[in-house]
């Protein structure tokens, strides 16, 4: 007769403890397949527990397939498959991973200046307004909170985006062509699904490597094509079998170059001729510091352009909302092939952002941030110009975006120079880091992401850089 | 000499208007490539505007590549590529899409009862608590709001999930093995990237078709394998070249069946032998109405199981947060190959959810919802049992989840029966709708998603169904 000691059960309920005891005995082979269990009444009497407790335990064992009942005969142990190792493997693995994590954490370095970081400034986000709208959204939108958001994004947000683009960028966009998603990277995977897997996508060389990684991880081939002063070389593109080309015409990363209208026309003609698409990555077009924002290519031909932008750059990196604007031919394919996907952005944040844009806060925020960044950039550039470092460097393409290029007139290998600076606690990347194929033109150019540079460390950092440049 | 009428400029600024006029003349060919523009001073004098206004307009035209300057010679029109049609194509397309949308909207039908819908009930979500935590998060977490969330999800949330699983499901999970994402569908695409594109994933037949659509849209081959009373048939699986098998062992959709321990062991052995993986979809395991939640397969062998669950089902469909637990071997691959991806869930919602779980609200909410759904299901089942319809139907697998099966004893084609019911404003799906390959066993079984059925319409709906079943 099975007997278990209920005194060891701790906080476990009687029925759960009985269930666990029997299950373990079955798994360990102590009770064999086909063996009859004591009747509920016997089991209860033997342990001085109620029949209902036993019933519950037996019921659970039945549902999980450990035992079965035969009418008027009783309960029997089921036939399990080959014995299976059930010892938890977590504890061991947990330790080793924990070790790795601690090592990783240790590696985090305190830089004097980190020109690779572009965290936005702490006091720049309009918390009070955002918080007010959130609270209002939560109370006004209770019902909407309980239904699934539209796969392509809630209508209010898409209309707000379209109106913002009209007002701010002069772009006439149908809200129906807008697809909202949890970040641009997610939208890239949608583009791959729209264009098909056996596709080649051309990329700018130099360019932001992560874009290519996302495309490739989603199963397409990527072809880096070098850029000249006007942007991606169309001749190279024409020789390729690319179906689409990913470009940032308003503000190329990292060179900061703007693509002139003639190159834009050439790219559109290429797309027209080859039934191809331009993926227009407009990631920081909002931060142009003189004149108007550069017009989008989308405005020149909405039939061949997939336009993309994100709110993570302009609002806060913790807000994972981006959008793309599909041309009608791809939109049709989206409705047929991809509209079954659930949305990826919580509707609560979508409604909050929609109100934030529609009530004019977004535009005000961008204007405020643009002024803020311009002033901050001017401060940094002024400091460089005043420092002794200035005799050894040039400043390029400083009219837009959250970074500019520092040309360093020193015949040292870029990698070595970076290491020297790193040894002095200055973290910096070079344009050549973003080249797929090394190009002479892009040597000795370094990227200054200035938005997260603490002002108080700057003078010291520039002095250190100046000295470092004299090292061999 | 170029002369423009500034009276038509409306609200456009002087410089912007001049820029637009010149640009349009260049694009239309009225001013030819190589032609010299009037000097800034001439242009200003001719239009009675300031030189600075002209300078700004010329500057913008230069940045965008319409004109160029030669030192001491003046401004010249640039050489554009072949003339490109710049008329916006949106207006036309916009109309046609708008028409489609209206048509779509008209199709939305008001059902007497919709057994296909499983919207959660309006008053079930703990708005007050959620709102309180959100407000606190917003004020406590300002700084975190301005940094990118960790790609795999913020640590607080992963720890909260691990502790919840330990407490609620008896699962010992390392928070480092948890990957948070914007919905299960997004996580499926990650699984595809982890397993590789040239993979075959086996699915349950019948099963939830959307899962297969997501996998296939991400480039893998899917193989539906029929289920018997114990779940997916391992013999069929062994004959296949599947690398992984997607199963819902706690509560199969749509049959509601629970996979017994013997089948689980067989599947694990298959995975072990074939270096394969089980994808354990635990989508509504929280809503088991009698006994304890069914233990997860993950607990039997964390080395071969990818566990998945979502908060969209238990909290609200508008919250797009799901997670998966990777075995160590895949976690390693994730860190090497996929950790470059940005997170997809806003950190604000992650912090809110983390507190909601850690402070015990989530478990209380689940318990409350489980009681609520059990009571509601009991009401529905009682109503069916009391109605004349009951002589023509059977109720199956009603111990868990937000749906149960209604067997209808009538020798009509399932499709025809659904149409008859639809004609009476009752929307319902059959299990055969979820079969990839028609199986006799699953005929005449209909799915009752009861959670969104309005109580006040139920009696009438059952009477209508009863009559409808007598129709031919």
Image (cartoon, coloured by chain):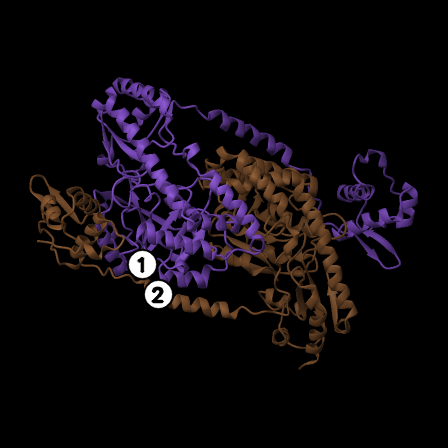
Chain colours: A brown, B purple
Residue B394 seen anywhere in this rendered image of the structure: yes
In which quarter of the view is residue B84 placed?
Answer: top right
Circles 1 and 2 in contact, beta carbons < 8 Å: yes
Q: Which mark is residue A93?
A: 2
Q: Which residue is mark 1?
A: B302
Q: Position of residue A270 (x, y in %)?
A: 62, 49
Q: Chain of mark 1?
A: B
Is residue A225 or residue A154 the one in the foreground? Answer: A154
Decide if residue A366 is on the left or right side of residue B444: right
Element under disc 2: helix
Decide if residue A305 is on the left or right side of residue B34: left
Neighbourhood count class around disc 1 (C-alpha, 10 Å): few under 14, some 14–19, many 20 upward: many
In which quarter of the view is residue A342 placed?
Answer: top left
Is residue B65 or residue A64 the one in the foreground? Answer: A64
Residue B86 seen anywhere in this rendered image of the structure: no
Instruction: Give me the residue at 23% from left, 57% from top.
Output: B269
- Separation (CA) of disc 1 from disc 2: 10 Å
Element under disc 1: loop
In which quarter of the view is residue B325 placed?
Answer: bottom left
Q: How many marks?
A: 2
Instruction: Give me the residue at 59% from left, 44% from top.
Output: A131
* Relative vertical location of residue B293 with respect to residue B99 in this rendering, above or below: below
Is residue B427 or residue B352 the one in the foreground? Answer: B352
């Amino acid at each position: 007769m099975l007997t278990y000691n209920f005194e060891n059960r701790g906080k476990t309920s009687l029925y759960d403890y009985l269930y666990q005891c029997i299950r373990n005995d079955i798994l360990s082979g102590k009770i064999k397949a086909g063996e009859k269990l004591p009747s509920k009444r016997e089991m209860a009497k033997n342990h001085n527990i109620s029949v209902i407790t036993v019933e519950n335990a037996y019921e659970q064992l039945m549902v999980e397939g450990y035992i079965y009942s035969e009418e008027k005969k009783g309960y029997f142990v089921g036939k399990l498959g080959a014995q299976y190792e059930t010892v938890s493997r977590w504890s061991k693995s947990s330790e080793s991973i924990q070790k790795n994590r601690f090592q990783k954490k240790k590696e985090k370095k305190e830089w004097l200046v980190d020109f690779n970081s572009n965290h936005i400034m702490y006091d720049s986000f309009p918390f009070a307004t955002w918080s007010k709208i959130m609270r209002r959204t939560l109370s006004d939108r209770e019902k909407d909170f309980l239904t699934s958001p539209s796969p392509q994004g809630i209508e209010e947000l898409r209309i707000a985006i379209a109106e913002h683009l009209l007002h701010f960028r002069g772009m006439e966009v149908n809200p129906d062509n807008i697809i909202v998603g949890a970040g641009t990277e997610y939208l890239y995977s949608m583009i791959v699904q729209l264009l098909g897997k056996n596709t080649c996508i051309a990329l700018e060389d130099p360019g932001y490597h992560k874009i290519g990684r996302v495309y490739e991880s989603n199963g397409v081939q990527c072809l880096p094509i070098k850029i000249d002063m006007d942007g991606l070389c169309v001749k190279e593109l024409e020789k390729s079998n690319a179906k689409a080309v990913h470009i940032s015409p308003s503000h190329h990363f990292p060179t900061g170059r703007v693509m002139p209208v003639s190159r834009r026309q050439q790219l559109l003609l290429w797309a027209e001729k080859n039934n191809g698409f331009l993926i227009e990555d407009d990631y920081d077009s909002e931060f142009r510091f003189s004149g108007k924002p550069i017009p989008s290519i989308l405005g020149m031909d909405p039939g061949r352009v997939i336009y993309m932008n994100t709110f993570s750059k302009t609002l806060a990196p913790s807000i994972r909302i981006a959008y793309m604007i599909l041309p009608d031919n791809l939109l049709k394919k989206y409705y047929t092939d991809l509209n079954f996907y659930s949305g990826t952005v919580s509707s609560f944040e979508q409604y909050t952002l929609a109100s934030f844009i529609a009530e004019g806060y977004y535009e005000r925020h961008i204007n405020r941030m643009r002024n803020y960044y311009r002033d901050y950039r001017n401060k940094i550039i002024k400091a460089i110009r005043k420092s002794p470092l200035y005799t050894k460097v040039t400043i390029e393409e400083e009219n837009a975006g959250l970074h500019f290029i520092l040309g360093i007139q020193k015949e040292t290998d870029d990698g070595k120079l970076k290491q020297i600076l790193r040894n002095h606690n200055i973290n910096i990347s070079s344009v050549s880091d973003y080249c797929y194929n090394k190009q002479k033109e892009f040597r000795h150019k370094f990227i200054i992401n200035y938005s997260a540079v603490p002002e108080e460390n700057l003078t010291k950092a520039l002095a250190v850089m100046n000295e470092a440049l004299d090292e061999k």
